[in-house]
Amino acid sequence: MTQKNIETAVEVKNITKSYPGVTANDSVDFKVLKGEIHALVGENGAGKSTLVKILYGIEQPDSGEIFINDKSVEINKVDKAIELGIGMVHQEFHLVPSFTAAENIGLGQEPRNSRGFIDWDKLNSEVSNIAKKYGLDVDPKLRMIDASVGIQQRTEILKTLYRNANILILDEPTAVLTPQETDELFEVIRSLVDEGKTVIFITHKLREVMEISDRVTVMRDGKVQGVSDTKNTSPEELAKLMVGREVFMQVEKEKAKPTEKVLEVKNLWVHDARGLLAVKNFSLDVHKGEIVGIAGVDGNGQTELVEALSGLRPTSKGEVIFDGKNIESFSPRKRRRAGLAHVPEDRANTGLNLKLDIWENLVGTSYFRSPLSKGGIISMKNVVDHSNNLREKFDIRTPGVFVRTGSLSGGNQQKVVIARELSEDPLLTIASQPTRGVDIGNIEAIHKQLIEIRDSGKAVLLVSAELDEVMSVADRVAVIYEGEIVEWVNPKDVDQQQMGLYMAGIKD
Amino acid sequence: MEWLEIFDISLFRSLIRSATPIALIGFGAAMCSASGVLNIGLEGKMLNAAFVGIAASYYSGSALTGFIWGVSAGVLTAILFGFLSFNLGADEVLVGLAINIFSIAGTRYLLETLFKRRGFFSDPSIQGIDPITFDFLVDTRFEKIFSGYTPSIYLVFFLAIVLYLVYYKTRLGTAIRATGENPEAAEDAGINTLRMKWLTVVFSGVLAGIGGTFLSLENMTLFTEGMSAGKGYIGLVASSFGNNTPLGTFGASLFFGLGDAIGIRLQGVYELDSRLILMVPYALTVVVLILIGIRQRIRVRPVPIPEQ
Amino acid sequence: MEKFSFKDVLILFAGTIITIGIAWVLLTVTGFVPREIGKLFFEGAVVGQRNILNTLNIATPYILTSIATVVSFRVGMFNIGINGSMYIGGLYAAWAGYKFTSLGHIPHVSLCIAIAIITGSLWMLLPALLKVYAGVSEIISTIILNFVAVLFVSYMANGPFRADPIAPATPRILETAELKQYFPNSQFNSGFFIAVIIAFLTYFILKKTTFGYELRSGGDGLVGFYPSRYSSYLGIPSDRSAITGMLISGGLGGLAGGIEILGNARYFYQELLFNQGFDGILIAIVGKLEPIGGLIASLFWSALRNGGLFVDYKTEVSREIVVILLSILIFFVSAQKLVSSLERFKFVRKLDAFFTRKIK
């Protein structure tokens, strides 16, 4: 494709980057035209992040060439990328909490007066002006501690614009946004392009690709799988390239046969760490023999709900009845003993202590019980047998159980959590984002396990922000928005568009 | 109200002298903490500077040479700290502790090997740094308050202002604070966080060096074993008392200096034991830390649940 | 902190060679014959009954303070206030040693030791509570308490507990409160056995009991991990673990101080100088934060120190040279990147894997 009239903003040729054991980018060619919105799609671990990190000077490629505006460049540090007019908005915001919006935006480039001191007034008015120009509503004097996620993201975008970025890289910008906020973001992106900016938009949500992008590049396993104009492709085709197999993931399962009620949540209210109401008047039932799903964009109270159910966070009002007992006063351990298991969303800090050995993490819920320990003394033989059994049963790939848990891959770490939680044969398993950061092969295994639990007559409460996952695994799904249930749906009777509306809090 | 008599000019002067080394260390510690480095090795840096300063003055007969060598020793120790923590990935607190232990032993070793002394070293050929007197203040009532201090004391006041300006009003200041609070944000803004950390650590080395030579060449003209007497740690405490800000640290240092000065004055005069007075600043630091902690707790006030 | 591996052996070995080299140069430059000094040094450290006993006697407080460090670090608290606990424990052991007059030997010694442990442990209660309930850094608060401890004990030795009108010191402890010294030529006393038992007991408790598991679940690393979400998630109150760990750590510090008084000094005086609390932290690191590692490293450390004292006594060489060399050795051992950079060599990786399997 040699269109002389259209200049290229970014061109990457034959980039390869390896980490010990993985080739994150394998001879990648990638080209972005000036003034376009270019979507870069792929699953977790496809190599998108590595590619943009190379573009932004955070990582250095092992080999290959980079051209910015048709000039060969070497981007060996972030400064250099900024100098070349590249700006990046990370998925996890890089903001200084105690600084104001303007202080964050101007950081490192603050205007100075004749005496060399920072001219704060000038900075504030400059920020206001840019914000107005691109329709980004941000108060320059607002401290980031007090700002909402949407405002934080706008601040991040303003940061790049303040630095005169012409090429903006947005890394999964919609992951933390509500559908409305996403729409607002898309407006902003379009106005950016109207002003002559180029946008690289990283995502794994194909709907967004179709809606916003001009062209799209698909990556898988560190390689580029295809490039095309968005209007000439379809979500099905992109998904095929992305996953490398037929899409519309269908998990094989039979119809659920729910029996008696195991969990009953009645009018539950929960406060979050900032004292705000995260869960509002929430009610739900879970029966044995079914998987109940909770769908919704991240940050709509799912975390607090799960913490309240598992005993990590006090409930403020309402009742939680488990297996006929009110468990409000129960400690997490007592809840486990009653048959409630919990696979937490934060694997690295909550679900595991990565500094401990694998066996130590595997016995976390059972070490105090015979035969693993007697009279407070741990029986090493029984503990090791127990751990090795779990290791085999759940296919944890490790050289042995006396290995630091932190040295395992994400998928195997998650298997340790699941193995430990299921080893108790619980009545109800609360699985929160169970496949986050887990590779495809292991995702399937985890889904299968959840369905097996169901088929053995036990219950599962699956909380996930992956719409595909909830819709294919769960038998009934509640959509949560701002701490409230918007609607109960049957996954078979609802289409993605309708779900999107529910997730935005819009009911009919 | 007899005891009120102790609050006179000489108490003030003694307060300022006690506060000076604490503030010098405190400023360094505050800058390090602001950039995210917990620097507990300042004690050793100070001690090395005190010894090297006096040794250089002894051999050269020049106070300035002593000062320059002393400060260099502080900086070299700081570089050792930075190299081990930043380049070789050792834990900062451990390196700090190891440097302090190393320095106590090292200065003692050199004292015994070079000067064949144990405990302390003083010699008429050591040139101390002289106090500065302001001629225009002579015979005014300000003379006793403002005149006749050694250079470092004036430097501390100067630094309090300069650091305040740097901290809040310059790019360097925001860069340092951003480095400590969110290194990724700083890196994003093109700030080299490692360089910022090196900068604050070396700066703290310079100040610890000045603090060390203040002890051995200005305040007195002699070296005693372990003469820093924990001032490196007290400076760190002062900086956390002042929430790592320049003026806060300065205020805390004056406060510690006041405790010291009253303690010295009361020694043997009144029934109240001076050691109890010396404890007061520490107790208050604990109180301040508790208040900071509680304030953060109280901030969370749950919103009421609406009635149905 | 990574697990003990072959790399550590290599680093220790290389570090030792380099520090010996530095010592060689230092000694030569200052006009000594390194070979002779080395011989004397070795003799002082481990040759002959008297020297061995002295080495073991010096080791006692190091063993205890290094294990105190191990315990606090393993629950995720960076306790550098063990030295303060030593002073407090020592002071109150002395007090109990002269105060209770009508007890037999065993009850009296046990009481003194118990009081040393309890007071040393209570001394750590404040920083533990501050950390848990107000988020105050335990590093800063324990530094503060170290100062307060020195001021406090010197006030007490001068005031309320002072016996001698001339010297600021407590009365001598009664004979019933003394830890037994077995040999006329050394202060070696039964406190050493207590320290060794404590080392093995700590190993057992941390590794083989459910209580130890609960303590470690929130930490087990070099850097403070408290508050641990993992512990709360398992239903282990991590607040309680953190506080308990700090109390045990302080108690061991108090015990170290108590044994110094009951076994060696026999009374508490104002000029008494403890610094084993600080050295203990470094020793614990050399011992890879393992109780038995701490025990071995303490013995090694005190052998070197005693060798240094012997050399100092026999020659003009300053005993401080040993501490200088030991801190240089610490620089090597704590340099994580240096250690992990060894992994680039294949034979190191192989031997690492081999040892891991052996140790299990």
Image (spheres, coloured by chain):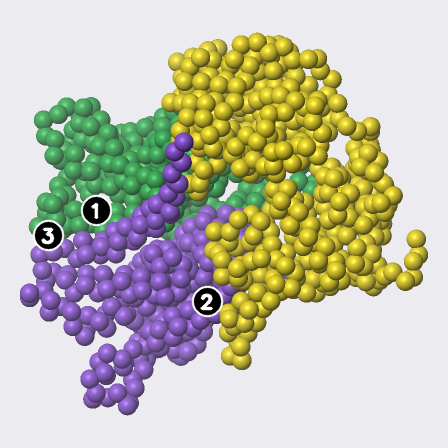
Question: Which label belongs to residue B168?
Answer: 2
Instruction: In the picture, one chain is purple; tell me its letter.
Output: B
Residue beneath disc 1: C153
Specify the colour of chain A. yellow
Q: Residue at x 38, y 38 (%)?
A: B304
Amino acid type at circle 1 is Val
The nearer-to-camera label among 2 and 3 is: 2
Residue C337 locus on image (x, y percent):
60, 46
- Residue at 17 percent of width and 57 percent of height: B274
Amino acid type indicated by mark 3: Ile
Q: Colour of chain C?
A: green
**Residue C309 disc label:** none
In front of the other: A192 or B147: A192
Q: Nearer the viewer, residue C257 or A75?
A: A75
Chain letter of mark 1 equals C
Q: Residues within 10 Å of mark 2 (few under 14, many from 20)?
A: some
Q: Nearer the viewer, mark 2 or mark 1?
A: 2
Residue B118 quadrant:
bottom left
* Residue at the limit of the structure toward the left, as seen here: B1
Residue B199 x, y percent position in the rendering: 52, 64
Q: Residue A432 in the image: state x and y as whole percent.
A: 58, 28
Local crowd size for mark 3, using a 10 Å CA cut-off: few (<14), some (14–19), many (≥20): few
Instruction: Report in which chain the residue with disc 2 lies.
Output: B
How far across and how far down the image is residue B262, in percent? 19, 63
Q: Is residue C38 visible?
A: yes
Q: Do discs 2 and 3 share a chain?
A: no
On residue C166, which mark appears? 3
Q: Find residue A293 and report its image quarter.
A: top right
Q: CA distance from mark 2 to mark 3?
A: 55 Å
User: Would you say C177 lies left or right of C134 here?
Assistant: left
**Residue B103 visible (yes or no):** no
Residue type indicated by callout 2: Tyr
